[in-house]
Amino acid sequence: MGQNRYQSWGRYPKAEQTVLKMLWRHEPIPSSDGATGSILPFGNGRSYGDSCLNDGGTLIDTRSLDRFIHFDPEQGILRCEAGVLLSDIVELIVPRGWFLPVTPATQYVTIGGAIANDIHGKNHHRSGTFGCHVSAFELLRSDGSRMLCSEIENPEWFSATIGGLGLTGVITWVEILLKPIMSPHVLEETIRFANLDEFFSISEESDTTFEYTVAWIDCTAKGERLGRGLFRRANHGAASLRGRRSTKYTAQVLPIVPSALLVNRISLRAVNSLYYRNQIQARRTRTKHFESFFYPLDAVGRWNRMYGSRGFLQYQCVLPHSDGASALREMLEAVAASGLGSFLAALKLFGDKESPGLMSFPRPGVTLALDFPNKPKARDLLDSLDEITRTAGGAVYPAKDARMSPKSYQVYFPKWEEFARYIDPRCSSSFWRRVTGPAE
Amino acid sequence: MRKLMIIGASSAIAEATARLFAMDGDRMFLVGRDSARLEAIADDLRVRGAAQVATAIMDATDDDLHAGVVEQAIAEMDGLDTVLIAHGTMPDQATTERSVDAARAVIETNLFSVVSLLTLVANYMEQQREGLIAVISSVAGDRGRKSNYTYGSSKAAVSAYLQGLRNRLQTAGVHVVTIKPGLVDTPMMARFADKNFLYAQPARIAKGIRRAINRKRNVVYLPAFWRPIMFVVRALPESLFKRLNY
C-alpha cells in the first residue's frame, strides 16, 4: 500500500499530493493545519488517467467510509457510505438475490467513484449508466454544508455530481436501487464475427434479447478482417441454476514487470490472433459464475503493471450513431496501421437511456475502448483518434483519459462551463486543470 | 452464537473484528465514547448480519461507569460470553517524559481501565464458569525502548496481568486471549507518516483476532511474523539493547 495507493490505474501521470483520510461520514472533511490548497475526494484509484489525481494539492481518501447503512432485502434498496467497494456490495447482496443495476468490468471501485464517473457496463443499452439507479446521496461541501441530493431534492446538484468527477464536493453516502436476480450465474453466448458489419448486425439483434452485450475485437486485423472479434452476450441465469456450485476464481497479482518490453508488435499480434482463434466454433454457450463473466481481469490482480513503470494510456470514445460505423472503421484502420495495437479492445453499442448526470460520458452510439503503452507514438495516434471523434460529434471518457487537449474536452463536453458553477471552491483535480487550461 | 461485548468499539481494529463476528450472526454490545461513530458502526454490523447490536456510551477511564455498562450488556444480550477489550491510547513519548500527568493518563487508559473492566468481567465469567476474554495488548509491551516506553510499559503490565488472569480462570473454564499486534495502519498511528511494509491493515489483524478467539489461543502475535521478531528482541542482552537506537 503506502504511497503506491495514491496513483491512477494507468500509472500515468505521476502526481505528488498530501493525503488526508476521511473516517466518519458525519464529521467534517479533514484538513491539515493552515491548508489552503485544493482538495479532491479519492476512492480506490481505478480511474486510469488524472481525474483521480490532484498534483500539488490534497487527496481526501474516502476508502475508510466503507460502512453499510441500510439494506432492504425486500425492496432491493441499499444505502451505504461512499467508500464501499462494489465487491463488498456484491458479496452482501448476491446471496440475497440482488445484483448491481450497472457494473463496470472491475468490482474494485468505490460506489462514490461509480457516481463521480457515472460508470457504465455491458447493459448500458438496457439500463443506462450507474447514475440512473441512484435514488439519493449526501454531498458534503468544503464549507461544511450538507445537501441531500435526489431527483426531487437539490436536483441540480444531483445532476452535477453524477459524472462530476468528484469536483462538486465529497459524497458521504449513497442510496441505490438494486436489481433482482434468480441465480449467481449468467448464461453467456460467444459468437465469432468476421468484420465490423457483422458486429453491428449481431449487436442490433442481441440488444433486444440480451441484458449484457460486449465485443472484443482484434485491433491488429486489417483489410477485410478489420473489426473481427468475439461477441459476448448474456442474461442472468434462471432459478434452476441457483444451487450450482460456484466456481470462483482465485485472485492472482501480476508480478512487477520491469519494463514495457512485453507489450510489443509481435506479442500484440500473437495475443490478438490467438484470442480470436481460441474459439473454434462460431458460437459457444456457457454457464458462468457472475464474477468470471463480469470481472475477468480482477482475477489477474494488478494487470496494469503489465505495461511497466511508464504506465499506459486508455482511450475510450463514443461515436454517435449517425456516422459511427464509418468513423469507427477509420479509427480501427488508423490503429491497425500504427502497429501499436491493444490487448484489450472492447466494442459496444450504448443505448439511448439518458443519465441524470450533467457531464455523463455515455450517449447513444458505439463505444470503443483501447489501451496502449505510454509512448510518444501512442500519444500521436490518440491525438489523431481525437480528431476523428471530434468530427464524428463523439466524446472521450474522462475517467480513462490522461492526455486529451482542452480543445477536445470542450468540444466533447459543451456543458463544461455550466458544470463549473457547481464545483466546490476548494475542489480541483489534475484532470480539471488540464482540460480547462489554456489551449496549446 | 456469541454474546460479545466490545470496549473501544470504534477503534479501527475493533471495528474490523466486529464485522467478522457480525457475519457469523453474533449478538453484540458496542461500547465507545462517541455515539455518532458507534451508531454508524452498529448500522453497518446489522447490515452485515449481526443478530443484534446495542451500544453504550462510555469513556473507559471513567471507571464509575464500568459496572453499569457490564450489567447493561448482560441485560441487552441476555448474557455475556465473549469480551474484547480494544481501547487504548498511543501517546507522544516525549510528552510523557516531560509530564507525569501525561504519563499517568496513559497508564489510566491503557492499564487501569482494563484492570477495572477485567475485574468485573472475570468475576462474572468465573461465576458462570464459561466465557472468553480477549484483550489487545501490544508487541511494544515485550520490551521497553526509548521511543515508546510509557506506552510499552502500560502494555507490558496488561500482558502480565492477563497471564495471571488466564492462570486463575483456567480452572473455571474461562479463557483469556492476549493479542499482540505489531504496527497497524490505523488512525492511532496516523502521525507516523511513513507506513512501511511492516504495517498491516486492520482487516488482517481482525482475521487473526477472530481465529485466536475461535481457537482459544493464549498469546497471539499479529501478524504472526512478529513472534520471531519479538523473540529476538527479548533475547538481546540488556548490555547490548541499551545501546540500540530504534
Image: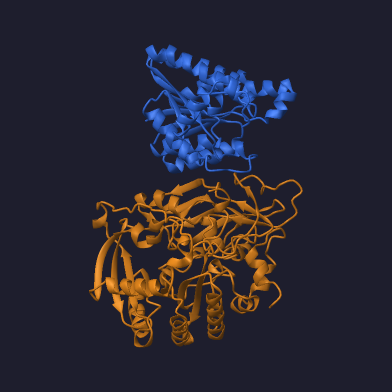
Chain colours: A orange, B blue
Q: Is residue A331 visible?
A: yes
Of the pair B190 and B124, the residue shown nearer to us: B190
Up/down of B175 relative to A433, above or below: above
Of the pair A136 and A418, the residue shown nearer to us: A418
Locate the C terminus of chain B and report the quarter of the image it occupies: top right
Of the pair A149 and A338, the residue shown nearer to us: A338
Q: Quadrant of residue B187?
A: top right
Q: Is residue A74 visible?
A: no
Going by the image, does B178 lie left or right of A24?
A: left
Q: Quadrant of residue B117?
A: top right
Please tell me which residue is depicted at 65% across the width and 61% down the height of the picture.
Answer: A168
Up/down of A104 relative to B182, above or below: below
Q: Quadrant of residue A287?
A: bottom left
Q: Position of residue A138 (x, y in %)?
A: 60, 54
Going by the image, does A267 lie left or right of B7?
A: left
Going by the image, does A176 lie left or right of B34?
A: left
Please tell me which residue is depicted at 46% across the width and 73% down the height of the picture.
Answer: A370
Q: Position of residue B1 (x, y in %)?
A: 37, 30
Of the pair A324 and A260, the residue shown nearer to us: A260
Q: Position of residue A396 (x, y in %)?
A: 54, 74
Please tell me which residue is depicted at 39% across the width and 25% down the height of the picture.
Answer: B217
Please tell me which residue is depicted at 60% across the width and 37% down the height of the picture.
Answer: B189
